[in-house]
Amino acid sequence: MKSLGLGLALPYLNIGGSLVDTQRGLLEIEKRTLDASEEYWALIKSQFSFAPKLRYFNNASLGGSPLLVQKATTHARDTLDGFPSKYMWGGWDDEKEKIRQSVAELFSVSNEEIALIHNTTEGMNLIARSFNLDPDDEIILGDHEHKSGSICWEVFQESKGVKIIRPTLPLLPQNEEDIVEVYRKAITPKTKIISICHIVNTNGMMLPIKKIYEMAHAQGILVAVDGAQGAGMISIDLHDLGCDFYTASAHKWLFAPKGMGIFYAKQESQHHLKPLIVCRGHNTKTIRRLENYNTRNLPELLGLGSAIEFYNYIGKEKIHDRSYELKNYFRSKIETISSLRLKTPASDTLSAAIQIVEVINKDVNEAQEYLSDNYNIDCRPMSTFGLNALRISLSIYITKADIDYLVDALVAYSDS
Ligand SMILES: Cc1ncc(COP(=O)(O)O)c(C=O)c1O
């Protein structure tokens, strides 16, 4: 276990001298805890290693990892290859538990409620396959659920006769109640589970989980949340948010190595779950039974530890505030341009760092290509639900200067 002596502990790995530049950057970050200037955020950006000239507005698809995480993960791979059997089976058990603890602390829950899995898709599969429902039971999935949170219910439950109800969400709700009402109307005495995105990947709309959970639980309905776009973007207290299960991909807004996911199951709800994969250790009573893969991606898991460390170093409230600062800066610029139209709900209770924008009278796929070819901008075109809009992710490595650049590019395209 080694600390860089910066006040920034790197408890999981001893990663040696190649970190000099990374250390310098981190030292600077450490000195500026109270600083939230653009210069500070440029410093955060300097800790990532995007390709030269690339403006990466596509974090909702996949995040980048900061240098610290890249180096820690590479080092872990090298260490593992130095003594494979030792590290795969037992050598890193303490580190793994410390990482579980750091994830639990980030989401204000107990470490006995966190499993370290691979991604959101796995978490949703784990939930959907766990239940033995009756054929006429009902599950509610809003129409904006990601395929990773709907196919598993279709394959594991609908095929057995369980009814899947797909209510239509408003694209631009005025307030949370507009969405709660959709779920209220979809619930019947046969509803057993609501499976719901925290933030939908289509137009970045944030769903009022707490209100839906309160309504559902009063009627004995379980709530499973797909947190792929929530975890890391905004500050989350999972006990307060309220849900039975919450699953996320740490390789998006938490900047972990690719293939690391987080699974939360409320203590009282864990008995509903069955592991997706069974092997030695499957009958343990703790939540660890859900992450028992035998040989697995431990270097990435250790990299997750470094990602949480990096994240905490900036601070979850500071990152939360930055998500809204960037959102509001982006929206205020777009709102002044008549050829561009925002298609994400405006209220801070209904969206954060994912916003979508239509270039009026232009096709979104052509818009995306134009931005990529002429401006090195990467963002995701969204065509479903008639959106015809570019999905813009405003992650912590985006500066206001990047947003200015993006808006200029959008204006140039709309004039072309
Ligand atoms: C809302 C949502 N759920 C699930 C996923 C699937 O994520 P993963 O491939 O990391 O499992 C995504 C990916 O973009 C997503 O946006």
Image: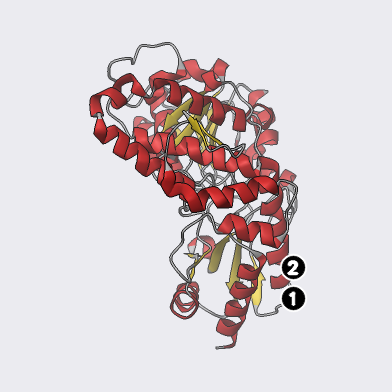
Instruction: Please indicate, yes or no, whether residue 206 appears anywhere in the rendered image.
Output: no
| Residue at 53 percent of width and 54 percent of height | 47
- Which label belongs to residue 336? 1
Q: Residue reaching furthest bottom?
A: 416
Q: In the displayed structure, would residue 356 be above or below residue 281?
A: below
Q: Position of residue 308 (x, y in %)?
A: 54, 38
Instruction: Report how many numbered discs are placed on residues in the image.
Output: 2
Q: Position of residue 416 (x, y in %)?
A: 55, 88
Q: Are marks 1 and 2 in contact (CB under 8 Å)?
A: yes
| Residue at 44 percent of width and 25 percent of height | 95
* Secondary structure category for the residue under label 1: loop
What residue did someone put label 2 on?
Answer: 332
What amino acid is at disc 2? Ser
Direction from residue 188 to residue 300 in the image, left or right: left
What amino acid is at disc 1? Thr
Q: Position of residue 167 (x, y in %)?
A: 56, 45
Q: Position of residue 9 (x, y in %)?
A: 55, 34
